[in-house]
Amino acid sequence: MDAMSLPDADAVIARARLGDPVALEALYRAYSTPVYNLSRRICRTTEDAEDILQETFFEVCRSIRNYRGDGSIWGWIRSVASSKALMRLRRNKYRDTDELNDEIAPARGASTALRMDLESAMDRLTDTARAVVWLHDVEGYTHEEIANQMGKTVSFSKSQLARAHTRLRNYLGEEALA
Amino acid sequence: MTAHLSMDQLIALRDDDRSEPGMGEALQHFAACIHCQSELEQLHQRTARLRALPSLAPSTNEFPAVHARVTVARQRRSRAAASLGLAIAATAVFTLITRDLVHPKRLDAEQLLQSEITQSQQLEHKLTAWNSDQRVINGRTAILVIQLENKIAQLDAEIAESAKMEQQAARVENEIKLWQQRVGLMNALVDVHLSKAGNVGL
Ligand SMILES: [Zn+2]
């Protein structure tokens, strides 16, 4: 992603470190969509995702001097974004039990009319399960990294991932092929 | 035949995670069970579908607000130091005045100036305590905040300039006017941050 969205990344980063607003804006342009997408997929609402986008780049502008360049710039920005998104989930904390979600899930073997599309199914997961499945299966974070960011254990992250897939499987009305 | 694989075991199989307990037995079962093989295939497909979800793009440009907040944070840091200096400079005038013949009119002016400075400092503390540069703002607020911060910076420059005035009484008079304006701007800034942007009338 780096080379594609930010040509001459090293020079831009060097200028951004000095607080050059043009360079900072170039970073914003290159990475605002993936940051927004990650936030929106984890937090579900556009309002939250826009706030996280702003929070992330505010932090990026303030802390880019501390970015040592030992990982990719996207890896660093993404870690800022995911920690802001998880912080937002903790703050909202309005839906982290899934008893309710189970009730509205179609029963196994329900007719295809009741099957949900993948996005609606993701929306119905608990906040934690949705965050874990997104960070692990799409963004490619390890369970150790997720556990670290969430302040939980590796087995917590693993069990949330399994829970997410079990729920998604049911919501999507998937049946074993055999 | 042993039980079908749990979701944890299917995921461990997908991710080649050897740390999941009981995988030896699970693998033996898996090799002979079409149901579990089909479940793993579905898991693979579901994962691929997740990765293929369209990338969502923001509909607003948050950069102006980000830039405003960064600028404000920087200005506020330097102002915190500078305004203390300004207040000390102003207080130094009082010492000079009181060393002169104590003139009742001058004493009034001195008190007035002191009270404006105190008010301004209290508002500054309020903004800092509320952490106003750490909060998410919208584009309109960003513009207002920048305008107010710039005006305050301008005033601070004028206050610093005023300290060079020769005539003490005129200097106090001038500084009262400037500090009063500063209090007004600080109040407006507090209002903006408390989401009363509509009342600010800039
Ligand atoms: Zn089986």
Image (cartoon, rainbow, N blue to C red):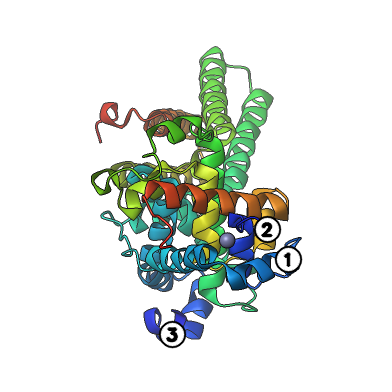
Q: Which residue is mark 1?
A: B25
The residue that disc 2 covers is: B2
List x then y, in percent, for residue A23: 42, 73
- Kindly report which numbered mark, 2 or 1, lies closer to the viewer in this rendering: 2
Three-letter residue code for mark 2: Thr
In the depicted view, which residue is nearer to us: B28 or A19?
B28
Mark 2 or mark 1: whose residue is earlier in sequence:
2
Residue A178 is left or right of residue A83, and the answer is left
In three-dimensional space, the C-alpha distance between marks 3 and 2, rounded to whole angstroms, equals 50 Å
Q: Residue at x 65, y 73 (%)?
A: B16
Density class for disc 1 (Cα within 10 Å; few <14, some 14-19, many ≥20) is few
Check the residue under mark 2 and report the chain it is in: B
Q: Are marks 3 and 2 in contact (CB under 8 Å)?
A: no
Q: Position of residue A59 (x, y in %)?
A: 53, 57
**Residue located 62% across and 46% down the image:** B81
Which residue, given by chain and number where applicable, does mark 3 sit on?
A: A3
One can see residue B24 in this view: yes
- Nearest to viewer (mark 1 / mark 3): 1
Q: CA distance from mark 1 to mark 3?
A: 45 Å
Do marks 1 and 3 share a chain? no
Tell me how many marks there are.
Answer: 3
Quadrant showing the N terminus of chain B:
bottom right
The three-letter code of the residue at mark 1 reads Glu
A102 over A86 or under it: above or below: above
- Parent chain of label 3: A
Q: Element at badge 3?
A: helix
Quadrant where ligand 1 appears: bottom right
